[in-house]
Structures are given as structure tokens and as C-alpha cells.
Amino acid sequence: MVSRDMVRIQVSEHRMVMIHRRSLCDNCSRRDCTSFNGSRVTECPNFKPHFVIFMKCRNCGAIYDPYYNIAALDSELCPECNEAKKNEGMVVVCHR
């Protein structure tokens, strides 16, 4: 079972990678890094993942790094498509 603070990304037919959504520091392989300041880190010049992963956006086809998309609503969309999706209005249908 995957917790809400993790996302499972399929990297090949039989391989999955779990990415922690809480902070980049949770996914970093660097030791003794001083970037962690006690709060959520979403950008870091010293970030070094355990595995290099690139994904193709389901919507626009852009290639992106899912590690820098950890706060996304949909992990299969690039950051730009996720931002556009977040700004869309919600449609509510009422039945009487």
C-alpha cells in the first residue's frame, strides 16, 4: 500500500520507483547535506537522486523530471500542465 506522501512511478514494464512527496531531501542520496532547513524542500541545487528518471507528460508530451514535480496533483503530467489543471475552475452539477 502506498501512503499519501509517496507516489509510485512505473519506469519499465516490471519496475516501479517510489518517490516521497514530502521533500526532495527524502529522495536525495547525498550524505551530510546542509540544504535541509527543517521545512519542505522543493528545490535544491545539491539534489542527487538515487535513480535518474525522466517521464513523458501524458498531456503535452514534454519530457520532465518527476523529482521536481513532487507537489503535483497528477504525477503523470509535467509541472506546466499540472499548473494549468490547478487553475481550471471546478464544475459542479446539481440534480433536482
Image (cartoon, helix red, strand yellow):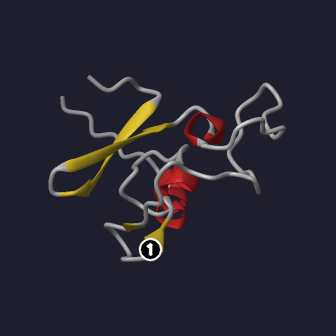
* Residue 76 appears left or right of 1: right
Considering the numbered disc 1 on the image, is that residue within a helix, a strand or a loop? Answer: strand
Seen from the viewer's position, the closer of residues 69 and 27 is: 27
Q: Position of residue 33 (x, y in %)?
A: 78, 39
Q: Position of residue 80 (x, y in %)?
A: 54, 66
Pick the quarter of the image with the C terminus. top left
**Residue named by callout 1:** 63
| Structural crowding at the residue carrying mark 1, measured as other residues with C-alpha within 10 Å and reported as few (<14), some (14–19) or many (≥20) | few
* Residue at point 76%, 28% (across, down): 39
Query: Outermost residue, front direction?
Result: 31
Pick the quarter of the image with the N terminus. top left
Q: Position of residue 60 (x, y in %)?
A: 38, 75
Mark 1: which amino acid? Ile
* Residue 89 appears left or right of 41: left
Query: Outermost residue, bottom direction?
Result: 61
* Residue at point 70%, 38% (across, down): 31
Residue 32: quadrant of the picture: top right
Figure disc tally: 1
- Vertical relation: 83 (above or below) 71: below
- Vertical relation: 89 (above or below) 20: below
